[in-house]
Amino acid sequence: MYHSHRLRHGRFSASGQIYLITTVCCNRRPIFLNFDHARIALQALRQTAASTDTLSYVIMPDHVHWLLQLKEGADLSAAVRFFKASATRGIHSQGSEMGPVLQKGFYDRQLRKEEDLVAMARYVVANPIRAGLVRSVREYSFWDAIWL
């Protein structure tokens, strides 16, 4: 059984820290196969600029991977909650009657200073290739990384 409150156990927000976030669509529905819905999710990521620096991301059909750095005074849970609420509001404003867009909770991984961020960004953006959606990231619309 899925318990989103267990995902919060031990979660700590640290300014300047880098996190890899994964958030999943409700019931793993491929909501972001719809180009307009994926575009809205991308806009929602960009709207978190007050609290995060996005280092890389990929919007997959049924989930989002987001490599971010928290800005001074920002809270990780609040930033993710803002993204999810913005994406949901935007999709619902398009007349969608689908109910919840993203599942409660999210997975986070705090990166250590010695980890290779460029390699992590490549891992994030290569998700569409590993999933068999495309042969090259150039064929996929919803990804970016500040180094690539």
Image: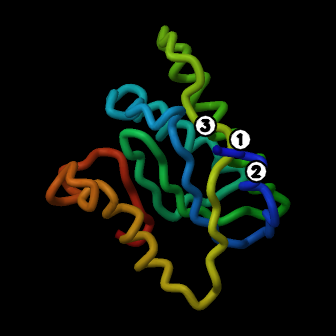
**Given this view, does label 3 or label 2 mark the residue nearer the observer?**
3
Q: Mark 2 highlights which residue? A: 77
> Callout 2: few (<14), some (14-19), or many (20+) C-alpha neighbours within 10 Å?
some
Residue at image point 49% right, 55% down:
65
Q: Mark 3 highlights which residue? A: 103
The kind of residue on which mark 3 rests is Gln
Any part of residue 48 in sight: yes
Q: Position of residue 68 (x, y in %)?
A: 59, 62
Quick check: 105 above or below 73? above
Secondary element at image label 2? helix
Quick check: 10 above or below 101? below
The extreme left residue here reads: 135
> Callout 3: few (<14), some (14-19), or many (20+) C-alpha neighbours within 10 Å?
some
Mark 3 or 2, nearer chain start: 2
Number of numbered markers: 3
CA gap between label 1 and label 2 equals: 6 Å
> Callout 1: few (<14), some (14-19), or many (20+) C-alpha neighbours within 10 Å?
some
Task: Judge by depth and name the residue closer to the eye, 148 or 11.
Answer: 11
